[in-house]
Amino acid sequence: MDRRRFNTLLAMAGAGMGTRAFAAESAPEVLRLSRNGWMPNNEVLPVLLYRGAFAPSSDMASAMEAAFERNGWPPQWRNGVYDFHHYHSTAHEVLGFARGWGRLVLGGEGGHELVVKTGDVALLPAGTGHCRLEASPDFLVIGAYPTGETWDVCRSAPDEAALERMRKVVFPQSDPVSGVGGPLMKHWRVA
Protein backbone atom coordinates (compact mmCIF):
# COMPACT_ATOMS: atom_id res chain seq x y z
CA MET A 1 0.00 0.00 0.00
CA ASP A 2 1.42 3.42 -0.89
CA ARG A 3 1.82 6.23 1.68
CA ARG A 4 -1.01 8.36 0.24
CA ARG A 5 -3.53 5.54 0.50
CA PHE A 6 -2.29 4.67 4.00
CA ASN A 7 -2.68 8.29 5.18
CA THR A 8 -6.16 8.49 3.65
CA LEU A 9 -7.19 5.29 5.44
CA LEU A 10 -5.81 6.65 8.73
CA ALA A 11 -7.76 9.88 8.21
CA MET A 12 -10.96 7.99 7.47
CA ALA A 13 -10.44 5.97 10.64
CA GLY A 14 -9.90 9.19 12.60
CA ALA A 15 -6.33 8.36 13.52
CA GLY A 16 -2.83 9.38 12.70
CA MET A 17 -1.88 12.07 10.24
CA GLY A 18 -5.29 13.04 8.85
CA THR A 19 -6.70 14.91 11.84
CA ARG A 20 -5.63 15.60 15.34
CA ALA A 21 -7.69 15.71 18.47
CA PHE A 22 -8.46 19.11 19.96
CA ALA A 23 -6.60 20.08 23.11
CA ALA A 24 -7.41 23.02 25.36
CA GLU A 25 -4.66 25.08 23.70
CA SER A 26 -6.09 24.41 20.23
CA ALA A 27 -9.64 25.55 20.96
CA PRO A 28 -11.19 27.44 18.06
CA GLU A 29 -11.21 31.21 17.78
CA VAL A 30 -14.73 32.48 18.47
CA LEU A 31 -15.99 35.41 16.38
CA ARG A 32 -19.31 37.04 17.24
CA LEU A 33 -20.77 38.98 14.33
CA SER A 34 -23.70 41.39 14.49
CA ARG A 35 -25.89 42.54 11.65
CA ASN A 36 -23.79 44.70 9.30
CA GLY A 37 -25.68 46.78 6.75
CA TRP A 38 -27.64 44.33 4.61
CA MET A 39 -25.69 41.31 5.92
CA PRO A 40 -27.73 39.50 8.60
CA ASN A 41 -24.90 37.47 10.13
CA ASN A 42 -25.91 35.34 13.11
CA GLU A 43 -26.20 37.14 16.42
CA VAL A 44 -26.87 33.93 18.35
CA LEU A 45 -24.29 31.47 17.00
CA PRO A 46 -20.64 32.52 16.61
CA VAL A 47 -18.23 31.71 13.81
CA LEU A 48 -15.68 29.12 14.93
CA LEU A 49 -12.22 29.25 13.36
CA TYR A 50 -10.09 26.14 13.93
CA ARG A 51 -6.44 27.01 13.22
CA GLY A 52 -4.31 24.06 12.12
CA ALA A 53 -7.15 21.60 12.71
CA PHE A 54 -5.67 19.18 10.18
CA ALA A 55 -2.06 18.03 10.26
CA PRO A 56 -0.16 18.10 6.97
CA SER A 57 -0.86 15.17 4.67
CA SER A 58 -0.35 14.33 1.03
CA ASP A 59 -4.12 14.44 0.37
CA MET A 60 -5.58 16.88 2.87
CA ALA A 61 -8.74 17.39 0.78
CA SER A 62 -9.66 13.71 1.12
CA ALA A 63 -8.75 13.73 4.82
CA MET A 64 -11.05 16.70 5.41
CA GLU A 65 -13.86 15.15 3.39
CA ALA A 66 -13.55 11.90 5.37
CA ALA A 67 -13.61 13.70 8.72
CA PHE A 68 -16.55 15.91 7.78
CA GLU A 69 -18.48 12.89 6.46
CA ARG A 70 -17.72 10.84 9.57
CA ASN A 71 -19.00 13.70 11.76
CA GLY A 72 -22.32 14.20 9.95
CA TRP A 73 -21.28 17.05 7.62
CA PRO A 74 -21.14 15.42 4.16
CA PRO A 75 -18.93 17.40 1.77
CA GLN A 76 -20.71 18.84 -1.26
CA TRP A 77 -18.00 20.61 -3.24
CA ARG A 78 -14.30 21.35 -3.81
CA ASN A 79 -13.51 24.83 -5.11
CA GLY A 80 -12.80 28.23 -3.51
CA VAL A 81 -14.79 30.99 -1.82
CA TYR A 82 -16.85 33.38 -3.95
CA ASP A 83 -15.30 36.81 -4.49
CA PHE A 84 -18.57 38.60 -3.66
CA HIS A 85 -20.32 39.12 -0.32
CA HIS A 86 -22.97 36.49 0.31
CA TYR A 87 -24.55 34.33 3.00
CA HIS A 88 -26.62 31.15 3.21
CA SER A 89 -30.13 31.26 4.67
CA THR A 90 -30.79 27.52 4.53
CA ALA A 91 -27.65 25.92 5.99
CA HIS A 92 -24.73 26.17 8.35
CA GLU A 93 -21.46 25.75 6.42
CA VAL A 94 -18.02 24.37 7.19
CA LEU A 95 -15.10 25.42 5.00
CA GLY A 96 -11.98 23.26 5.11
CA PHE A 97 -8.91 24.95 3.67
CA ALA A 98 -7.13 22.03 2.01
CA ARG A 99 -4.45 23.86 0.02
CA GLY A 100 -2.94 27.32 -0.30
CA TRP A 101 -4.08 30.44 1.54
CA GLY A 102 -6.87 32.97 1.27
CA ARG A 103 -7.68 36.38 2.66
CA LEU A 104 -11.38 36.49 3.53
CA VAL A 105 -13.77 38.95 5.07
CA LEU A 106 -16.53 37.66 7.34
CA GLY A 107 -19.61 39.62 8.25
CA GLY A 108 -20.11 41.76 5.15
CA GLU A 109 -18.41 44.88 3.82
CA GLY A 110 -15.98 46.33 6.35
CA GLY A 111 -16.29 43.12 8.40
CA HIS A 112 -13.67 40.91 10.03
CA GLU A 113 -10.71 40.24 7.72
CA LEU A 114 -8.65 37.11 8.25
CA VAL A 115 -6.09 34.96 6.49
CA VAL A 116 -6.74 31.22 6.34
CA LYS A 117 -4.21 28.62 5.31
CA THR A 118 -3.81 24.93 4.68
CA GLY A 119 -5.22 22.90 7.58
CA ASP A 120 -7.55 25.60 8.93
CA VAL A 121 -11.33 25.16 9.15
CA ALA A 122 -14.05 27.82 9.44
CA LEU A 123 -17.52 26.99 10.73
CA LEU A 124 -20.10 29.56 9.63
CA PRO A 125 -23.61 29.59 11.10
CA ALA A 126 -26.48 30.35 8.73
CA GLY A 127 -26.63 34.03 7.83
CA THR A 128 -22.88 34.68 8.15
CA GLY A 129 -21.52 36.88 5.39
CA HIS A 130 -18.32 35.79 3.68
CA CYS A 131 -16.24 36.84 0.69
CA ARG A 132 -12.79 36.06 -0.74
CA LEU A 133 -10.58 39.15 -1.10
CA GLU A 134 -7.54 37.35 -2.51
CA ALA A 135 -6.02 33.87 -2.55
CA SER A 136 -3.02 31.90 -3.70
CA PRO A 137 -3.37 30.26 -7.13
CA ASP A 138 -3.59 26.80 -5.52
CA PHE A 139 -6.31 27.77 -2.97
CA LEU A 140 -8.61 24.77 -2.47
CA VAL A 141 -11.61 24.72 -0.15
CA ILE A 142 -13.85 21.81 0.89
CA GLY A 143 -17.46 22.86 1.53
CA ALA A 144 -19.73 20.75 3.71
CA TYR A 145 -23.10 21.08 5.43
CA PRO A 146 -24.92 19.04 8.09
CA THR A 147 -26.77 16.01 6.81
CA GLY A 148 -30.03 16.98 5.13
CA GLU A 149 -29.20 20.66 4.63
CA THR A 150 -28.98 22.25 1.20
CA TRP A 151 -27.41 25.63 0.65
CA ASP A 152 -28.52 28.72 -1.18
CA VAL A 153 -26.60 31.90 -2.10
CA CYS A 154 -28.06 35.18 -0.87
CA ARG A 155 -26.63 38.50 -2.11
CA SER A 156 -29.07 41.03 -0.69
CA ALA A 157 -30.74 41.92 2.59
CA PRO A 158 -32.92 39.13 3.94
CA ASP A 159 -36.65 39.48 3.61
CA GLU A 160 -38.98 37.95 6.19
CA ALA A 161 -38.95 34.58 4.34
CA ALA A 162 -35.13 34.41 4.48
CA LEU A 163 -35.13 35.32 8.19
CA GLU A 164 -37.65 32.56 8.81
CA ARG A 165 -35.48 30.06 6.87
CA MET A 166 -32.49 31.00 9.04
CA ARG A 167 -34.50 30.52 12.23
CA LYS A 168 -35.50 27.02 11.06
CA VAL A 169 -32.02 25.73 10.17
CA VAL A 170 -31.54 22.56 12.21
CA PHE A 171 -29.01 22.57 15.04
CA PRO A 172 -26.09 20.26 14.06
CA GLN A 173 -25.72 16.94 15.85
CA SER A 174 -21.91 17.14 15.98
CA ASP A 175 -18.83 19.24 15.39
CA PRO A 176 -17.62 18.81 11.78
CA VAL A 177 -13.98 18.37 12.80
CA SER A 178 -14.05 16.41 16.05
CA GLY A 179 -17.51 14.93 16.39
CA VAL A 180 -20.14 14.85 19.12
CA GLY A 181 -17.97 16.15 21.96
CA GLY A 182 -16.35 18.87 19.88
CA PRO A 183 -16.19 22.64 20.36
CA LEU A 184 -19.37 23.34 18.37
CA MET A 185 -21.42 21.65 21.07
CA LYS A 186 -19.98 24.03 23.69
CA HIS A 187 -19.92 27.30 21.74
CA TRP A 188 -23.21 26.90 19.89
CA ARG A 189 -25.41 26.08 22.88
CA VAL A 190 -28.39 28.40 23.02
CA ALA A 191 -30.61 29.08 26.00
Image (tube, rainbow, N blue to C red):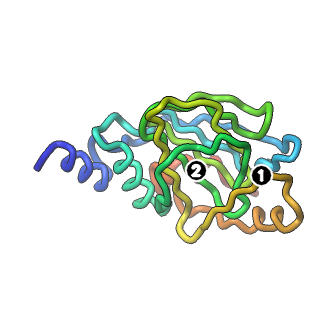
Mark 1 vs mark 2: which is more N-terminal? 1
Please name which of the two marks, 1 or 2, marks the residue nearer to the observer.
1
Label tally: 2
What residue lies at 47% left-to-right and 58% top-to-bottom?
75
**Is residue 25 shown to the viewer in this render?**
no
What residue lies at 45% left-to-right and 50% top-to-bottom?
178
Residue 114's spot in the image, x, y percent? 63, 29
Residue type at mark 2 is Leu
Q: Which mark is residue 155?
A: 1
Is 166 in front, or is 105? 105
Tell me: 121 left or right of 149.
Answer: left
Tell me: 39 left or right of 138.
Answer: right
Q: Helix, strand, or loop for circle 1?
A: loop
Most distant residue in the left direction: 1
- Badge 2 is on which residue? 184
Tell me: 128 left or right of 146.
Answer: right
Could you say which quadrant of the image residue 112 lies in?
Answer: top right
Residue 41's spot in the image, x, y percent? 77, 48
Q: Helix, strand, or loop for circle 2?
A: helix
Residue 65's spot in the image, x, y percent? 40, 54
Is 106 in front, or is 86? 86
Report if the CB atoms under discs 1 and 2 are less than 8 Å apart: no
Tell me: 29 left or right of 23.
Answer: right
Could you say which quadrant of the image residue 100 lies in?
Answer: top left
Is 10 in front, or is 62? 62
Residue 116's spot in the image, x, y percent? 54, 32
Residue type at mark 1 is Arg
What residue lies at 68% left-to-right and 29% top-to-bottom?
113
Position of 102 relative to 163 (above/below): above
